Amino acid sequence: MTNMFVHRVRAIVPYLACLHLLLANSTRLDAGNGEITVESKGGVVVCVSPPAAEVGLAVLKSGGNAVDAAVAVGFAQAVTWPEAGNIGGGGFMLVCPANGKEPVVVDYREVAPQKATKEMFAKGIDWQSAKTAGVPGTVRGLELAHKKFGKKPWKDLVMPAVKLAEDGFTVNAALAKSLNEVLSDPKTTNAEFRKTFSRKDDAKWQNGDTLRQPNLGRTLRVIAEVGPDAFYHNKDLLLRVDSKTPADLLEAEMTFSNGLITSKDLVNYKAIERQPIRGTYRGFEILAPPPPSSGGITLIETLNILENFEVKKHPWNSPETTHLVAEAMRRAFCDRARYLGDPDFTKFTVNTTTKEYAKKLIKGIDLTKATRSDTLAPEIELSKESNDTTHFSIIDKDGMAVSNTYTLENAYGCRVVVRGAGYILNNEMTDFNPRPGVTTRTGIIGTEPNQIAPGKRMLSSMCPTIVLKDNKPILITGSPGGRTIINTVLGVVVNTIDYEAGGRAAIDAPRLHHQWFPDRIVIEERPDAAKLSAALKMLGHTVAKSAQQGDAHTIRIDPKTGMRTGIADHRRDGKALGEQ
Ligand code: DON
C-alpha cells in the first residue's frame, strides 16, 4: 500500500465512522491495516494487543469496572504483548473514578535494588545484563488499583491471562514482526528467552501462528490463586510452582545471571498511591502522573508556556507552530534534567508547573530564531564527549476512566526470562542518570536528582493523561517512546484543544520532539517534511527525522452527547473495542 493511499484511508476514517454510527450503538471500523476506531455509548478499551482488548471488553461486559478491565488487560498483555506488557516491569496508572470522586495515580515504578550503587553504570551499560533490572512493580501496582477500586474478584481478572499463556493465542502481524526482530538480534543471548519465544521449528513467526508460554501460565496461575504475595514472597506459601514460588525463581535467576535483586528487595517493594499533577490549559483540566515520572510536570510546564501564545493562529504543522512548540519543549526538558527525580530522595526547589513560572520562561522565546539549548542551564556543566512501553486507555459505562502506561524499558527489557517463571525482566535501571555529573550535548544526563541510590525509583517519562472539562473526562491518552512520550501526549492535547481535531485526526497527525539535548527537532515522517525542515533550518534549528513517534491508544468522550470514541494508533497494530 502506498503512503498516499494509507493517508487517504486515514483521512476518511472519521467520516466513515460517523456514517456507521447511524447504524449501530457500537461501531467498529477497520481501515485495513489493523487500525480501528470504535464509537460506543458504553465501555471502551483501546490497547496495542487485540487478544488483550478482548479480555478487557469481556470484563466490562460481565459487570467489571474500568479498573477491573485495566487489571485484566495489564496481565493479559504480559502474555500477548511481551515486548512491553509485563509482570517483570512497572508503570503508572491514572484512575479517574466516575461521579467526580478524587483521581488517583498508582505508582508502580520499579526501584533500585539495595545492592545498586551510584557509579554502577559510570563505565558504560550492558543493556542486556540482569544488573539493569529494577525490582518489578507491576503485580503490586495492579493489586493496589484493584484493592482501591476493583469490583470483581482478583482471580477472575488474572485467569484470562493464565488461559492465554497456557492455551496459547494467535500471533498477529505486529507481534510476529516484533518477535522476529528480537530473535534475529545477536544481542539476544539469554537461552531461556530464546526457548520461550522461538517457534518450535526455529522458523520465523507468521501472522496466524500460536504462541504458548506454559511457564508464564504457571506463574500467573499462582498469582491468580494465591494472590500477589506469591510474586513477592518466597516463604510460607500454600502453593508453590514445582515446589518453588515465582519469588524463589527470581532469586535463583539473580544468582545465575549476576543480577542485584534479593528476596528482601522483593518483599520490601511497595506500590504507592499518589495525587496526580494537575494543570489547566485553555479552560481544560489536565491530570498526569507526578514524580517519579517526569511526565506530568514536563507536560504541564510545556502547556503553560504554550498557553501564552495564540497557537492556532498557525496551522499545526506549520514551521511557526513547530518552532514555538519545540521552544516550549526544550525549556521544559531542561528543567526536567535540572530538578526531577524520585520525590523520596529529591527536594523540589522550584515549582515549574505554575503559570507565573511559564511567564518568566516565555521572555526568552524568540519567534524568529531558535534558542541554543547550551544557553538554558549555565549551572549544568556540559561534558565534551561525545524502546519499549505500551499504553492503554479504558472507560466503563459509568464513566470511570483509566489511563495506564507500563514498560520493561527497552523492547523485551533486558531480554532475560526468569528460568521456570517465564516472565521477562525489565532494564529500567538504565533510566537513572548513568554517569554522575556527566551531562552531554548528545542527551546523556548526569544531574543529581536522578542518580542511582538503593531503594530509589528511577525517573520516568511515562505520562498516562486524562483531560477533563467540567470535571468529566474528555480525553484519555498516553504513549510509549521514552522521552518522546511527553511530547506525543502534548501533541495529542494540543491537536484536541487548540485545533479541535477529531479523535482520529488528533492521533494521526505527524508528531515532533525536542528534549533540550540533543539540540534538534525530530519530526515524524510526513509528506511535507522537506519543506518544513528547510523552514525550521532557516530559523536556526537542527532537524532530524523519525519514521514513527509513539503509539497513543486513546479515548475521546464527547461532553455533549456522551459518545466515546476509541482510537487505536495506526503506528502499531492496536485494537479499539466498545460495548454494544
Ligand atoms: O519510564 C520511561 O520513561 C522509559 N523506561 C520508557 C521506555 C519507553 O517508552 C521505550 N519505548 N518505546
Image: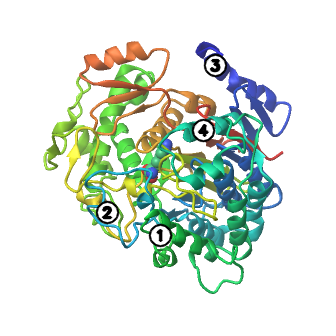
Q: Identify the residue under disc 4.
A: 178
Q: How far across and how far down the image is residue 460, in percent? A: 42, 54
Crowdedness of circle 3 by 10 Å Cα count: few (<14), some, many (20+)? Answer: some
Q: Which of the numbered marks, if any, corresponds to residue 6?
A: 3
Q: Estimate the spatial distance between the alpha carbons at disc 3 and disc 2, rounded to whole Å.
A: 45 Å
Q: Estimate the spatial distance between the alpha carbons at disc 4 and disc 1, rounded to whole Å.
A: 29 Å
Q: Identify the residue under disc 2.
A: 452
Residue 286 lies left or right of residue 239; in this view the side is: left
Q: How far across and how far down the image is residue 177, in percent? A: 62, 34
| Of the two numbered discs 3 and 2 in the rendering, the one whose residue sits closer to the viewer | 2
Crowdedness of circle 1 by 10 Å Cα count: few (<14), some, many (20+)? Answer: few
Disc 3 secondary structure class: helix
Residue projecting furthest to the right: 23
Q: How far across and how far down the image is residue 365, in percent? A: 24, 33
Q: Identify the residue under disc 1.
A: 255
- Number of callouts: 4
Residue 388 lies left or right of residue 530; in this view the side is: right
Q: Where 436 falls versus 269 (above or below)?
A: above
Instruction: Give amino acid for label 2.
Output: Ile
Q: Going 32% across and 52% down the picture, which residue do you hit?
A: 354
Residue 493 lies left or right of residue 307; in this view the side is: right
Crowdedness of circle 4 by 10 Å Cα count: few (<14), some, many (20+)? Answer: some
Q: Where 567 falls versus 401 (above or below)?
A: above
Instruction: Give amino acid for label 1.
Output: Thr
Disc 2 secondary structure class: loop
Res. 312 image quadrant: top left
